[in-house]
Image: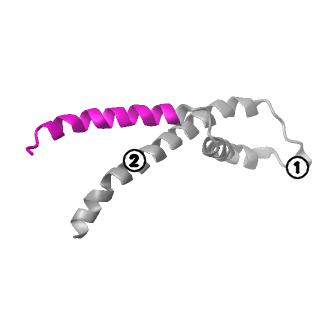
Amino acid sequence: MEIAAASFHAPQAAGLRIERAAREFESLVIAQMLAPLFEGTKTPALFGGGEGEKAFAAMLHEEFAKAISARGGFGIADEVKAEMLRIKAAHEQPQQEGRGP
């Protein structure tokens, strides 16, 4: 029974993994786009700055990017997800054709 239940949920799990991978990819792209925006900014010494801020800047960009992506992003994740689903369907089609009724 558990094997049947696991195989029943497998397509849903694959869809969730694809969704997550697409969102993570979009976050990565957005983080790379945000990094140059912060290169020219200087933080006053009173409020931070220094080597500590430089060390954590990449993490800050990643968190900004995750927040942007979670709220819809730039549409990159939707396109990536659609393409990954197309590739998945093309990969599964020959396997299904080989099965008997």
The tag earlier along the polypeptide, 2 or 1, is 2
Question: Residue 86: x percent and y percent?
Answer: 35, 32
| Residue 4 appears left or right of 74 | left
Category of crowding for the residue at label 1, using alpha-carbon neighbours closer than 10 angstroms: few (below 14), some (14–19), many (at least 20): few
At label 2, which amino acid type do we have?
A: Gly
Return the residue found at the far front. 101
| Residue 44 appears left or right of 23 | right
Q: Which residues are magenta?
A: 78-101
Label at residue 15: 2
Return the residue found at the far left. 100
Dividing the picture into quadrants, the one containing residue 2 is: bottom left
Dividing the picture into quadrants, the one containing residue 54 is: top right
Question: Could you say which is closer to the camera, residue 25 or residue 39?
Answer: 25
Question: Could you say which is closer to the camera, residue 29 or residue 81?
Answer: 81
Q: Give SS at disc 2.
A: helix
| Residue 12 appears left or right of 95 | right
Q: Main secondary structure of the magenta part?
A: helix
For the N terminus, give its image quadrant.
bottom left
Question: Could you say which is closer to the camera, residue 99 or residue 56?
Answer: 99
- Say whether residue 37 is magenta: no
Dividing the picture into quadrants, the one containing residue 32 is: top right
For the C terminus, give its image quadrant.
top left
- Say whether residue 100 is magenta: yes
Q: Which residue is mark 1?
A: 47
At label 1, which amino acid type do we have?
A: Phe
Distance Cα–Cα, label 2 vs label 1: 44 Å
Question: Residue 96: x percent and y percent?
Answer: 17, 40
Question: Residue 78: x percent and y percent?
Answer: 51, 35
Residue at x 48% of width, y 40% of height: 22
Residue at x 25% of width, y 35% of height: 91
Residue at x 23% of width, y 63% of height: 4
